[in-house]
Image (cartoon, rainbow, N blue to C red):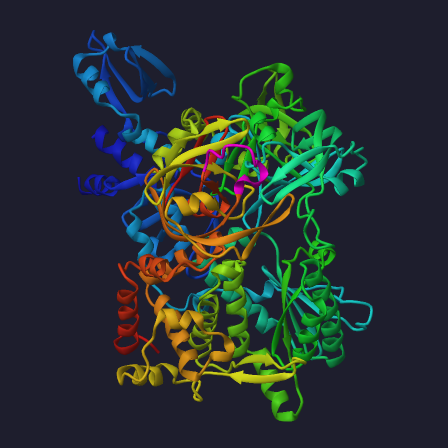
Amino acid sequence: MKRNLACILLLTGLTTIGHSAEMRMWLSRKGGLMEAQLLNVQGDTVTLIDKESRETRIKMEELSLSDRMHLVEVGGVDAAVIGTGKTGLIEKEIKVNTSQFNRLKDPLTFGAKMTKGFELLETPHFLIGTAGKVQGHAIGETAERLWHGMAFEHIGFRQDWGDKRMLILLAEDRDTFKALGKWHANAIATLMMQHGKDGQEVAAEVTASWDHSGDHEIYLPDDMQASHNLLRKAMVFNVKETNAKEAARESATYRKVFAPFPTHCLADELLELEMGQVDSYGAEGYFAIGTGHAFFKEISLAGKSETNLLTVSGSTKDEFASKGGFADGTSWARTLHALVRSGKVTPKLDEMFKWKTEDLTPERLVIMYSFASYMESDAKRLASFAKMIRRIGTSGQIPSQMEIAKLFGFESVEAFEADWIKYIKEGDFR
Amino acid sequence: MKYFLTRLLACVALFATGVSAQKVPEKDYRDFKAPNGKVIKAVMLDKTDTEVVLLLHNGTRTNVPMDKLSEEDREYAKDWAKDKAAFVMKCRGLTIRQCLELRGYESFPFRLENNALFIDGKINGKPARLLIDTGAGTSLLHEPYAKSVGLEVGEMTETVLGIAGEAAAGWTPVPTLQLGEAVFKDRRILATNLVKGQPEGTKSSEDAILGADFMSKLDAVISYPDQRIFLRPDKSDEDEAGLAKEGASTDFRLFKTKEGRAIRGNVVSKTPTVATFKLINGTTQEMAVDHFISEDQEYLNAWSEEGSFFLKYCQSLTINELLTLRKYQSFEFERRGNHIFVEGTLNDNKVTYMIDTGAANTCLHVESANKFGCTVGKMDQWVYGIGGKAPAAVSVIHKLTLGKTILTDRKVLATDLKRGEPDGDLRYVGIFGADFMRELDAVVTYTENRIFLIQR
């Protein structure tokens, strides 16, 4: 009798989807990817069934935000589930099988003047090119972990990415790096001219800053994209070693998973990809959102920030200035917390959205960091953040401040700002 | 004792193998009583004023006149609503893709590039990048591309009008235009320079624009949530799978082999390696599963008799019914020529919008933007399109609605949309573009003349 009663209870509250559900990829917070169809939802447990009719039960909160969105749409699950679930460092929790990273036989070269080229290491979503002694495994793993973090939080990320890989080049060999710089300056000049802009000016700027900056973005030619199934935009890390001390530091940076600087650059790049291009008239706030997010991921995953932003000015584009946060890269939150509590600093959305790199002070940069930290601090806010990024991706513009406030559930910008300030003062801002 | 055993087995099966969950769950069945007192275990699928459609426990479907039901059952049938019925609700898990592929549609994943939709096709046997553009009343070829694939572009005596002006065009005979299995033969399509007026060296991102003329002809369904466009090959001039010749209904699915052959049929049985099809011509054929392209292999691997049985009933739902189950709102659109229009509001004024997948961003007619209370800035921006570029102003829409869908505080560009038709009467206030359609997960169906939107 007891067994029968148990059976009835199990059936109560069961939402059976039936055989009509489609096979799709499901992602758990541990990084497990499973191709399966939704069988049913019972309470907080989802049952999936794979092609071999094997069932897997998983707690809804263990599923990615995008999977929970799917459950709301197709499974008839209450929309409140989107704002629930654990937050935290998904990127650190997931499992990445580095033994599946695969070395390719042929190097990749850019232009006839590049003699050595880049050795290639293939990961599920990236192609890592290395020139010199630097190794690609740690960057590959960092990139994969950040990729899964994005896929977990952002609804369309996996679909938008498709089956392509992103090229990440680690250029330690100086000749190869210089040759790549020349190739890129020519390519960007041609591209700019095709869009009616002064290609030579842009090329001069690229050339002047090439060796000063730690990372660059380049655009790959059509044939290279096709032959290696790559995204158009690629990243280049300038792995310098001008003296023994720096060499040791640089070497450590690229040997370690979640080293601060690469984590910052990769996090920024992946979010930019999800946001897509924005129109000039709707770009206000783009810098704050992207930069804040990059510093947030850098500090939360690496434990500190080692990244400075570079400004280029002067008629010949050879005057450089560096902008960073507070000197101690491990105590930004504490310092801002004190400044906000004492009333010396008051975060304002309107002001922050107008800042450019050249306007930055340590306080301003850390305010941008606090903005990202606030938006990604709990499941509900994270869902709102994902919605905002999705809106940017579809509209090609940053939503108005009022719309951002609404996305986070506030009736006014002032109410949104008050909650943000409260988070800095009293919340889990670290 | 028997009762306990039966329930216990059902319970074990449900949670151990998943097989029973693929059938209609037992709890969905109801005892219907015939006037002679005989009990029939069945699920109600549909009803009319005079009869009900029942799915019997043995899997067969039957129509029963209302007057053959007991009074209690007639009351039940009277209160029964399709959109609330448990079995029908399970169909909400069906995707648009499954729904349409089962009806013989061919689906194409599209690429989104800056909100524009691209699919691959062939023109004169050569690969072509095609832009899907519901705002283009007629399809267009990019003139340099047309010449590069061996087409003879006629004299440039025609004029095509675009958002930014006009461009000369010439009628071009096109021996074949192929979209998957759909083939159009011996068409005449206008060719123009699609990058006219843009900086020298600008490459066209498309080889041709697939306009509303082809979409309408092929009963297209454009689904942003699926990122797919669905077309009916049997509506083209030639259909290799044979449907056009046979003239049969679309109750058959299209399967493609790795060698590029297409067959239209339904799976009737399957082993792990071999599927048996009932083909559209009535014959039966066995084929190895690994003989098919990967998407069809996935379908075949997942196929089961029970699942097929379930889908057969879900399949009868229209896109409208399916998306209504998913809480989408829909609007019947008005066709004027090949263009499609919907009613809505702009800052609380009743207006009409043109639906345009080819417009990356929503754009208002500047006169209407001013008239209907938008905050219109200076004409210091540019919009690009056929004919080059035209001045535009950043404008803020305070509130835009389509049904219950409300968009507030949005920046769009406003330009002179009458530029293309200086003497015409512009009967709409602007173009509802891909930005809003992506945000609202739009589905556009030419078959049902509807656009579906959902606000998440």
Q: Quadrant of residue B192?
A: top right
Task: Note whether residue B22 is visible.
Answer: no
Give the percent coordinates (x, y) of residue A402: 33, 60
Q: Nearer the viewer, residue A84 or A190?
A: A190
| Furthest residue in direction front, as rendered | B423
Left/right placement of residue A241 relative to residue A6 reads right
Residue A126 left/right relative to B429: right
* Residue extent of the magenta highlight: B417-428
**In the image, is residue B274 above or below residue A127?**
above
Give percent across and percent down for residue B6: 27, 31
Q: Is residue A406 shown to the viewer in this render?
A: yes
Q: What secondary structure is the stretch in magenta mostly built from?
A: loop
Q: Quadrant of the C terminus of chain A?
A: bottom left
Task: Tell me which residue sits at (73%, 63%) in the image.
Answer: A190
User: Which residue is found at the position 52% from the left and 73% from the top?
Assistant: A263
A293 vs A36, nearest the viewer: A293
Question: Eyeballing the image, is A190 above or below A330?
Answer: above
Quadrant where the N terminus of chain A lies? top left
| Relative to B339, A345 lies left or right | left
Residue B60 within the magenta-colored segment of the rendering: no
Q: Establish if B424 lies above or below B38.
A: below
> How many labels sit on residues?
0
Q: Position of residue A62 (x, y in %)?
A: 37, 57
